């Protein structure tokens, strides 16, 4: 490797692919985006309040709805989309509560790993 170059860690190897935990990753993305949304609107409300924008109590009632409404709606939408996509998993490959296969494991990635390596209950 020449000096000052980027190492190629993701080059093709004869190793088993690393399974991704989509559920955890999407939850973390939701947390980051929700925090950014809330921080952005808090800054906007601080500037608006300094300029004398909040005059009556009904102005303050809109603040929690605007801060927490969209992140909660995005979380509900993400859970619904995950539930819908889990409907495409064949019977026996599910999260343990459908059919046979990976019962009790609660790990959908194991079915993918088993098919890729050619080992496991579904071969």
Image: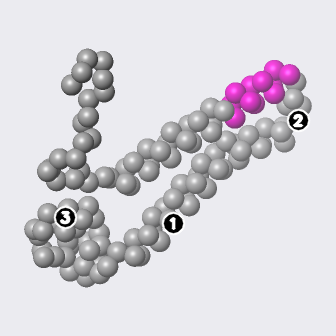
Q: What x and y, as percent, mark residue 122?
A: 16, 76
Q: What x and y, as percent, mark residue 120?
A: 11, 70
**Magenta range:** 41-51
Residue name at image x 81 percent, y 20 percent: 50
Residue name at image x 45 percent, y 64 percent: 82
Q: In this view, does 93 lie above or below 106?
A: below
Side (left or right) of 28 relative to 121: right
Residue 80's tag is 1
Looking at the rendered image, the disc whose residue lies closer to the viewer, 3 or 1, is 3
In the displayed orientation, state which residue is furthest to the front: 2
Q: What x and y, as percent, mark residue 79?
A: 49, 61
- Local secondary structure at mark 3: helix
Towards the viewer: 82 or 46: 82
Closer to the chain start, of discs 3 and 2, is: 2
- Local secondary structure at mark 1: helix
Are the two marked residues, 3 and 1, in contact with CB atoms closer than 8 angstroms? no
Q: Distance between the residues labelled 3 and 1?
A: 28 Å
What residue does disc 3 label? 116
Closer to the chain start, of discs 2 and 1, is: 2
Are the two marked residues, 3 and 2, in contact with CB atoms closer than 8 angstroms? no
Q: In this view, does 52 lie above or below 40?
A: above
Predominant SS of the magenta segment = helix
Residue 46's tag is none
Badge 2 crowding class, 10 Å Cα cut-off, few under 14, some 14 to 19, many 20 or more, is few
Q: Please indicate, yes or no, whether residue 105 appears anywhere in the rendered image.
A: no
Towards the viewer: 72 or 108: 108
Looking at the rendered image, the disc whose residue lies closer to the viewer, 2 or 1, is 1
Residue name at image x 74 percent, y 25 percent: 46
Closer to the chain start, of discs 3 and 1, is: 1
């Amino acid at each position: 490797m020449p000096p000052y170059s980027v190492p190629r860690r993701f080059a093709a190897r004869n190793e088993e692919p690393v399974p991704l935990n989509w559920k955890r990753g999407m939850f973390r993305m939701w947390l980051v985006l929700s925090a950014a949304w809330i921080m952005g609107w808090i800054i906007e409300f601080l500037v608006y309040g300094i300029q004398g924008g909040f005059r009556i109590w009904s102005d303050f009632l809109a603040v929690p709805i605007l801060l927490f409404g969209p992140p909660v709606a995005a979380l509900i939408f993400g859970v619904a989309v995950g539930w819908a996509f889990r409907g495409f998993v064949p019977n026996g490959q599910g999260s343990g509560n459908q059919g046979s296969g990976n019962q009790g494991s609660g790990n959908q990635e194991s079915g993918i790993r088993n098919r890729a390596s050619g080992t496991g209950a579904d071969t």
